[in-house]
Image: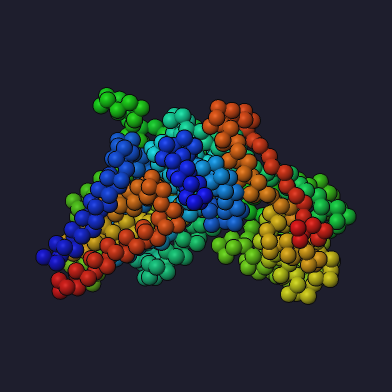
Amino acid sequence: MKHLLTSTIGALVLATGVAAQDIAIVTPYLAQPGAQALIEGFETRAAEKGWEVNTIDTAGDVAAVISRMEDAVTQNVDAIVIHIDPLQVTPGLQAAADAGIPVIGLGAGNDPLLVTNVTTNGYAMAAETAVYVADRIGGSGNIVMFVFDPFPPVQIRGVVADAIFGNHPDINVIDRVTPDVQDGGIADSRAKMEAILAANPEPGSIAAVWAAWDQPALGALQAIEAAGREGEGIVITGIDANPQARDAIAAGGNFEASIAQDFQAIGFKTADVLEETLNGNAPGVPSIYVPTQFVTKANAAN
Amino acid sequence: MSDRLRQSATLLGFALIILFFAVRLPDTFLTARNLLNISQQLSMLMVVAATMTIVMVMNDFDLSVGSMASLAGIVAAVLFVADWPIWAALSAALLVGLLGGVFNGILVAVIGILPFVATLGTLTVFSGLALYISEGTTIFGRDIPAEFSGFARGGIPLEALGLERLKIPALSLVAFAVIAVTWVLLEHTSFGRKLYAVGGNREAAHLAGIRVVRVRLIAFALTGLGAAGAGLMFAARVASANPTQGAGLMLDAIAAVFLGMTMTKRGEPRVLYTLVGVLMLGIIDNGLTQLRVDSFIREILVGLIVIAAVVVAHVSKRRGK
């Protein structure tokens, strides 16, 4: 009976349209775990608020994001949420602005046409892991970097790490690898690391592996273990602290640290900020940063 | 009779799709704004699919168009960064497309490698070149001239027709121009007739005095040029150049030509039917987005519709024999 009552009230609220906001989320990256977690966080909080959310994935196609944003404008949604670099979708942002529809960034980037962007500070995350590596190896030794410059949020991590390693005269970056990510990033990173290990056979000739995200760090770990070189003290760090990485860090091997973005919290925060915006209280700042957590063996299991 | 069924089944399906969306989305689907939007959204695919039709007329195809589109965008952007004038950077990018197409043509027509293998190889080469030239990064922001990205936002205003704040998008105009030129080339020139002759029977075409190698070479060059043009349109639309951004164009272009082939008399590619194929793909995408169908389900549906059209065409063709 109680259930029936709740459903009836819910249906009435939806039917009258009092609380139901119509929100479109558009991204080309839904296949990636990070994007999924961000969007699930948003959807969870949006469901609590009774919003109608339409999540649209364009399977990697950036121009299609613009197209789908235009479609959402045609549909006259109440707001659009994007998870993509806003600089690549200016016509879509402009279409929304012309129609007076607010657009908010969910782990996106900065743009004057966005209400705001809720995210973590990618520069800061890369700085934390790179400084950890530099300190752990005493500011001296050969480092292998795994980067991915075609994807702007990952590219900025590499830039920061370059600066930090470049600031240590005794640190030598022997390779800056861009792995093929079509297989998810682990397998190709492992193959690349195996080749680098083969080219540097002397124990101690590689002091650390800094990876711009977890998959290459896991691939490098597999390569080091398969080569029987796990005892050399090669330090590995990743970024994102995905479950597989946490397991590896908790095991206490070479993979020592990663950094966790609380994707769900970013999603929650985005929905809350959007609600405020729809109530006429836009945050008035270009970015809202959600805190991150440095993950080592001590807290990896949490 | 069966030929007519085959020809009309896809068109009928297309009409039903439009009717379905028009009924379900009475306020937003068949509006001038939405239709103009669709034409702009599909403009890059129209160009790639139209020029893909040129090689598919000869039963060849080109898998490298997507990576050529990415490469052309990157070439132009890198030259913008090097302070080249816009016209020079765009010309250089189109030249790269033409030369890439000629290279495909040499591999296929002169050396005799299967198009699948040759263009699969050049797909990787072009994609690698785009990554190498750009150092893997996306070129955007102030590096892309405002006049270039502004072109994609421009168009012919329709205020005179009483349509406030609406315009025929510049990208749509480019796409229609490319389709018109391709149509004239394929349907109204001796070069076009030679292409269809080569497609009908290569050996017979050769015996009839058609210089098959030259015809195929030119056809691949034009497809490369079209891909590069689409890549530049893409870069203007997203105001940036990414070394992988054109990758999605290739399969959609081939799917559009196949859809078009289900509507022609003998199952041969015709550019106006390719256009219908492109519109089908785009309208399904637009309508299903507006109906809030899950994007993954949307992909499945698009694939199934392509398969259904081809199956109906295939079965009715067999019955007709």
Q: Is residue A109 above or below residue A29?
A: above
| Nearest the eye: B168 or B163 | B163
| Nearest the eye: A120 or B213 | A120
Q: What number of labels is visible?
A: 0
Which quadrant is the C terminus of chain A positioned in? bottom right
Residue B27 % position (x, y) = 31, 37
Residue B77 in sight in this render: no
Q: Residue at x 30, y 49 (%)?
A: B279
What is the quadrant of residue A175 in the picture? bottom right
Q: Is residue B46 above or below residue B300?
A: above
| Nearest the eye: B269 or A4 | A4
Q: Residue at x 64, y 65 (%)?
A: A186
Residue B108 in sight in this render: yes
Q: Is residue B187 left or right of residue B139?
A: left
Q: Residue at x 81, y 66 (%)?
A: A252
Q: Residue at x 37, y 61 (%)?
A: B303
Residue B38 % position (x, y) = 34, 43
What is the quadrant of residue B186 in the picture? bottom left
| Residue at the extreme left | B1
Residue A99 % position (x, y) = 43, 30
Residue B55 % position (x, y) = 31, 60
Q: Is residue B150 above or below residue A227?
A: above
Q: Is residue A267 left or right of residue B26?
A: right
Q: Is residue B234 left or right of residue A189?
A: left
| Nearest the eye: B107 or B233 | B233
| Residue at the extreme front | A1
